[in-house]
Amino acid sequence: MWELSSEMTGVVGIITLFVLVFLKVPIGFSLFLVGTVGYGLVVSPQAALAKLGTDPFNNVNNYTLSVIPMFTFMGMLLGNTGLGRDLFVAFNAILGRFRGGLAMATVATCAAFASVSGSVIATTATIAPVAVPEMRRSNYQDSLAAGVVAAGSTLGILIPPSSNLVIYGMLTEESIGQLLIAGIFPGLMTALFMIITVFIMVRVKPELAPNTVRVDRAERNEAFKKVWPIPFIFIVSMGGILIGLFTATEGGAFGAFLAFVVSLATRRCTLKGLKDSLYGTARITGMLMIFIIGGITFGNFISVSRIPSFLQVYLLELPPVLLMLTIFAIFFVSGFFMDAMAALIIFTSLFYPIVIAAGFSGIWYGIITILMILIGFLTPPVGVVAIVTSGLTKIKLETVFKGTIPFWFALMAAALVLIVFPGIATFLPSLMIK
Amino acid sequence: MKAAEKGIRKLINFSAGISGICIFLIMLMTVWDIAGRRLFNSSVAGVYELSSLGLVVISFLAMGLPQIEGENVGVTMIYDRLKPKVKAVFDFFISILCIALFSVVFRQTLTFAGRMASSNQITPVLHLPLTPFIYTAAFGIFVLIVAFFWDLIKAVYDFKGDNTNVGIK
Amino acid sequence: GGGGGETPEGEEPVADPVTFSLSHFMSNQHPLHTNVLVPFADAVNEQTEGRVTINVYPSNELGPPPTTVDSVVSGAFEMGFVLAAYTPGRFPLTSILEFPFMFETALQGNLVAADMRDDLQKYEYSDMKLLWVGGTDIAKIFINKEVSDVAGLAGLKLRSPGLLYNELYAKLGATELSLPVSDLYDALDRGIVDGSLMSPSALVSFKLSEVTDNIIDLDVYMNPLIFVMNNDAWAKVSADDQQVMEDLLAEFPAVIGAQYDAEFEHGVAFGKEQGINFITFSAEEEAKFHAITDPLKEKWIADMDAKGLAGTEMYEKALQYIEAH
Ligand code: NA
Ligand code: NA
């Protein structure tokens, strides 16, 4: 007989979740399993059993989420057309002459590519194979080369489009259009902070990036001529959302379609490229949906356990800035061993009601949440982006993790600036309301 | 054994292929709808429900793929320190756990489909019955279970110390 | 199960105490949550001396609204309070409550619905217990174009609240779009839709006053709400305690009707305060509108009868009850 109170059941559930995850049970499945069993204990076993049949279908049968494959497809398709390389060459033409310029160009390339890709993994997969060999050729140390690619890739979901902001919006019922638009300035600011980080690093330790690169004029002009699809697609798809030509959900399909047309028009769309992009998109969507199904089930369990209202009593006692710093600390610590997606889902269900009750903007908190999970993408041992970067570049995982450390501070600085100046996130969305 | 592997691969790729086609079609449909609405003041009926049901098809049919690609990961911090045989035992039990969980999900989804079939519930605009889409989801879950069997087979080979037969990472 | 339920100290319950979960889609600030559902749960617990505990979960915490009815039937949770329109096609006879120009106030609509409860239970809620059936405040037409007559509605993109109104829009020459209320704010703001049939209370609760320019001042229809319970769960409650619940539920129609009428008045006043233009159709245009909506009822009755459902019977009863209230 289960005698624990619902709150204690919730706590036991959270602990069990971590145990399972550490035993290598895939995170989406762990969330699903613990959520189901916990719900069964708090509500009733029949209830949990019934939810097993209905929830996977019902949670996926969701119009808002249908934008996720679109945002992913957009990035996949453009990645397969070689646009990543063109972008890198173009930014290199501007930044390559400075010390650490290739690394700065990598950040800029990531930021630019992020504006047409809604997935971190798609961004890493596009930029890492292009940028890392170039940096190695210029005798950059592996830690910087891999670290900057991994860190820069995280911009993929801060700068719109962003699958993760869509998931946040779905969980909180905040306007997805406003959330996406809100990411623009914080994304650019974070990119700038990363470039500054590189600048400082190579000043302090010049051996990280011993050589500079000069790109000749002809090559530079050639490169610039090829990158027009990026601003074109970004301005049309995100601008269309901003001025109300279509909804955020439709904007995803429209952007993907533009990416398709552009890759046809520039004759860089092979049948194989299209097929690979569709398979890749299916794979990422399938992976994300398992997370979403598991995450929502776990979220339901956390709701019925009443832990959020329990936490609320204590956390709402804190002054607002201290509350945010506490949440930030929780994100940071758990980011080491918790998957970023899982953190997004679990902490949104835990903290969002508290943050709103404390009087903060839900749009702003969405951007803060994304910034906080970005650090988790990079921190060992569970740092998905670092792991993917290591896999793509064959650079040792420890080296990648080490290389990302300076960029944690760039991300933290961005979050702190955003706490002090919320307008950086809320200004653009405020223009959308008449 | 090779034949079984090949069959599993084929099934998962086929399923993901339909998912990919569906992604492309939903993209086209949405753009057609925006264009129709903005240019000719006529929209495609039921884009809203077709998109969400389309996502059901896309998501469930794609679920097996990341599983055999080894992308649904947990934390390997402890796991990495284990001896190969212990690792194989670990993988074996995790696969069994996932197969058990999703077998229940599969069965309950079929029950759900049966209930929906008898309740006459339809989509609001196109009046589509939900049942076929729930069966599609159930099929996707079945494919996912098959993918777990792949892991199970691999764990058995790993335990025997024979890694040559299964060509996945 | 039932880890969340606590029996009062020092009480020795006679029957096995039961704990039910009640899921609904409104926020925990919504008057129906604070003034109706939570007090109901408290009263049930108190009057059954702890034998029946109801935990109320607001804001879709247990799952999205379109799944509420199925979750109740399957037993995922025992009680659900939801708009009938979320399960199109499932309760065809209940949609009689959403007929155009049936009711003048939410109170009237709720009293009539209460009279129809037993018949509806018999005809289309056999797989669950229909605790209560009623509706929201009467919807008007929110519109972001200057419209002075029925013809002006042609060519507009309107959000449809349900199957019946798809047909109305087709007759008006309007394009219907189907989206959930939660997306309506954005859709109106972005011009994705030009308008929607909507209850004035939503001007406040969904902040629609911020994105609505005009409202056509016709009281078109009531959006039906249902409160359902799992059959097995209902059977676990002793006959005496069932009676306790029924007595408390008997107060719902008057309370909820009055509550929504107050929300309606508040919404209209708030809308006017916010500068929303209330358009009044001339008597002639109003008659034209009725001429379009009246045949919808006849078609509905014919459709139901053709399907072997009690269309005519329910319509005649409804008219009787309307007469009475
Ligand atoms: Na992006
Ligand atoms: Na991490």
Image (cartoon, coloured by chain):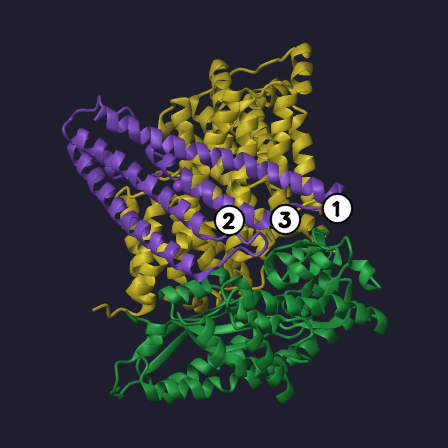
Q: Which residue is mark 3?
A: B45
Tell me if mark 3 has few (under 14), some (14-19) or many (20+) residues whose alpha carbon lies within 10 angstroms of its own.
some
Q: Is mark 3 within 8 Å of ligand 1?
A: no
Q: Residue A379's x, y, as percent?
A: 40, 39
Q: Which residue is mark 1?
A: B41
Tell me if mark 1 has few (under 14), some (14-19) or many (20+) residues whose alpha carbon lies within 10 angstroms of its own.
some
* Tint of chain C: green
Chain letter belonging to callout 1: B
Say whether mark 2 and mark 1 are on the same chain. Answer: no
Q: CA distance from mark 2 to mark 3?
A: 26 Å
Q: Which chain is purple?
A: B
Q: Residue B156's x, y, as percent?
A: 17, 33
User: Can you say which quadrant of the picture contains the C terminus of chain C?
Assistant: bottom right
Decide if residue B69 is in sight here: no
Q: Which chain is yellow?
A: A
Decide if residue C292 is in sight here: yes
